[in-house]
Image: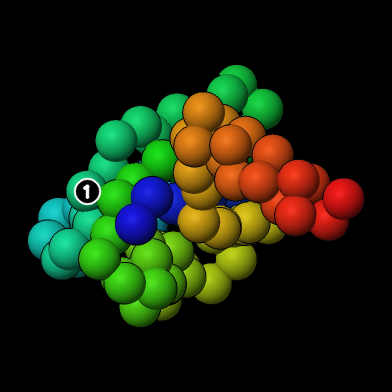
Amino acid sequence: MLFASYWELNENMSAAERLGIAQKVTNSGLFPPKNVKILRWDITPDLWGITLFEVDSAADAEAFADVWRAAGAGFFKLTKTAPVSPVQEVMPRAAELLKALR
């Protein structure tokens, strides 16, 4: 399953705090979680970013953000994570749906 996550880091948390949490998570071996394959992980200068990742189950997708939250409350200001599909696969399904509704 392919998932995309949009996230915003908490700008009220100091850079040192964020770095400490990031080191804790990565040094613990808990990130990336088991069964999570990160395809892209990008951040902007304004502390928001996206991650595109593959998992086998919804539980694996939940683990992606849960490990950060467990390591540091308030690390994220906002997260939005959902399954995604390539547009070229969605368009034919939408066309079939529209055809069936005529």
Residue found at x 78% / y 46%? 98
Q: Please say which color scheme the image uses.
A: rainbow
Tally of marks: 1
For mark 1, does the 10 Å Cα neighbourhood hold few (<14), some (14 to 19), or many (20 or more) residues? some
User: In the rendered structure, which amino acid carries the disc numbered 1?
Assistant: Lys
- Quarter containing the N terminus: bottom left
Taking depth in this image into account, of 50 and 43 the one nearest to the observer is: 50
Residue found at x 83% / y 56%? 101
Residue 65 visible in rendering: yes
Taking depth in this image into account, of 97 and 90 the one nearest to the observer is: 97
Q: Outermost residue toward the right?
A: 102
Position in image of residue 84 (x %, y %):
51, 48
Taking depth in this image into account, of 12 and 98 the one nearest to the observer is: 98
Q: Which residue is mark 1?
A: 37
Position in image of residue 75 (x %, y %):
54, 59
Position in image of residue 73 (x %, y %):
53, 72
The answer to which quarter of the image holds residue 94 is top right
The answer to which quarter of the image holds residue 77 is bottom right
Image vertical order of residue 8 relative to residue 87, above or below: below
Residue 23 visible in rendering: no
Taking depth in this image into account, of 28 and 42 the one nearest to the observer is: 42
Image vertical order of residue 86 relative to residue 37, above or below: above
Position in image of residue 46 (x %, y %):
67, 27
